[in-house]
Image (cartoon, rainbow, N blue to C red):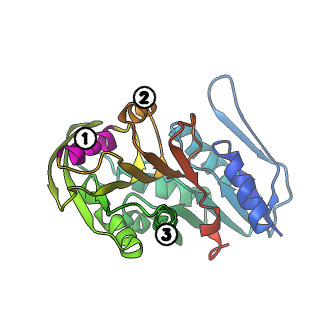
Amino acid sequence: MSLLFPGTSHSSLAESIAKRYKFTLGKCEIKKFSCGETYVKILEHVRGTECFIVQTITKSANDDLMETYLLADALRRHDAERITAIIPHFGYARQDRRASLGEPISAQLVAKLLVASGVTNIITFDLHSDQIEGFFTTPVDNLHCYQLFADYFQKKQLPDPVIVVPDTGAAKLADRLTRVFASPMAILHKTRPAHHKVSHTHLVGDVKNKTVILFDDMIDTGGSICSAKNEVIALGARKDVYVAATHAVFSGQAYGRLESADFAEIVVTDTIPLAEKLPNITVLSVVELLYKIL
C-alpha cells in the first residue's frame, strides 16, 4: 500500500492523483503556530511504506517549501521506505544561476534541503531550466506538458498557427511543442532592465497574418506575455492571440493585466490552483501525465 500525504497548497490535485492511481490519502496534521512557525504531525503508521507528498509551490513559496521539508523529515524519522515528493511547480526555479555578483543559487539550495529532509525521489513538471535536475543527488522526473497543449490546440484547428515564445529561454520547450503540433516557431528577444520589467526588442520569425499562440513555461505577473501580445499584433499577427503556459503563478497585477489584454484564450495546467477564474482561462489537468511513473 502506498500513502499519499497532501500539503496545504493544492489539496484538490492531491485528491485527484490519489483517486486516479488508487493511493490512500495519508492523515496528517498541518497548522501554524501564532508565531508563524509551521507544525506537522504524521497520523499514520508509515514504517516500511512507500510514501508520496503532493505539494506545489504557490505565491506562499516559503511556507509551501517548509511544509514539504517537515513532512519529509517526519516520514523519514518514522522509517518510511521511500519518500517521493510530487512538486508540480518547483519554486525558486528561475534562480538557477548567479545573474550578478552577490546573488545565491537558490534553486540549488532548495534541492539540497529537499534531499536533506529525506526526499528520495522528485517528480515535477516543466522545470524552468533542465540544469536544475543536476542540483539533486536523488532521481528527478521532469515531466513535460507540451503534448497536452498540442492535443488541445490541434482540436481547435486554428487558421495558420505559429508558436511564439516571449524569450529565448523558452525556445527549447517550444521546439518540442512545434514538433508535435507541426507549426512554425518565432522567438521574441526579451531584456529585463529590472525585476518584473520587460522590454521586447525584435522578433526572429514571421507572424504576419498568422494566429499566434504565445507559449512559455509560466506566467508570473503577466508583464512578458502581455508585452509579447502587443508586439506580435504590431508586426501584423491576427488579433485573436492565444496563450499557453504550464504554470499559472499569476502574482501581483497578473489577473488585471490578463483581463485587460483580452486574449482569445489563456490555456494553463492545474500545477498551481487558480485564485480567480477569468472567462477566457482554460485549465488542463496534468494527472494523466503521471501514468508512466506512478
Tell me what residue is drawn at x 57 percent, y 35 percent: 275
Kindly indicate whether the residue at mark 3 contacts the one at mark 2 (C-beta within 8 angstroms).
no
Instruction: Point out the tag, 2 or 1, that comes first from the N-terminus.
Output: 1
Tell me what residue is drawn at x 72 percent, y 42 percent: 40
Give the residue at mark 2: 256
Amino acid carrying mark 2 in the image:
Gly
Classify 124 as above or below 275. below
Classify 139 as above or below 86. below
Kindly state the secondary structure of the residue where label 2 is placed: helix
Kindly state the secondary structure of the residue where label 1 is placed: helix
Quadrant where the image shows the N terminus = bottom right
Front residue of 36 and 163: 163
**Mark sitting on residue 147:** 3
Give the residue at mark 1: 230
**Region of the chain picked out in magenta, as a range:** 223-234
Amino acid carrying mark 1 in the image:
Asn
Q: Examine the image and state in which quarter residue 128 appears.
A: bottom left
Instruction: Point out the tag, 1 or 3, that comes first from the N-terminus.
Output: 3
Q: Given this view, does label 2 or label 1 mark the residue nearer the observer?
A: 1
- Distance Cα–Cα, label 1 vs label 3: 27 Å
Is residue 90 covered in magenta?
no
Tell me what residue is drawn at x 32 percent, y 47 percent: 104
- Distance Cα–Cα, label 2 vs label 3: 29 Å
Q: Residues within 10 Å of mark 1 (few under 14, many from 20)?
A: some
Residue 221 visible in the shown view: yes
Front residue of 175 and 7: 175
Kindly state the secondary structure of the residue where label 3 is placed: helix
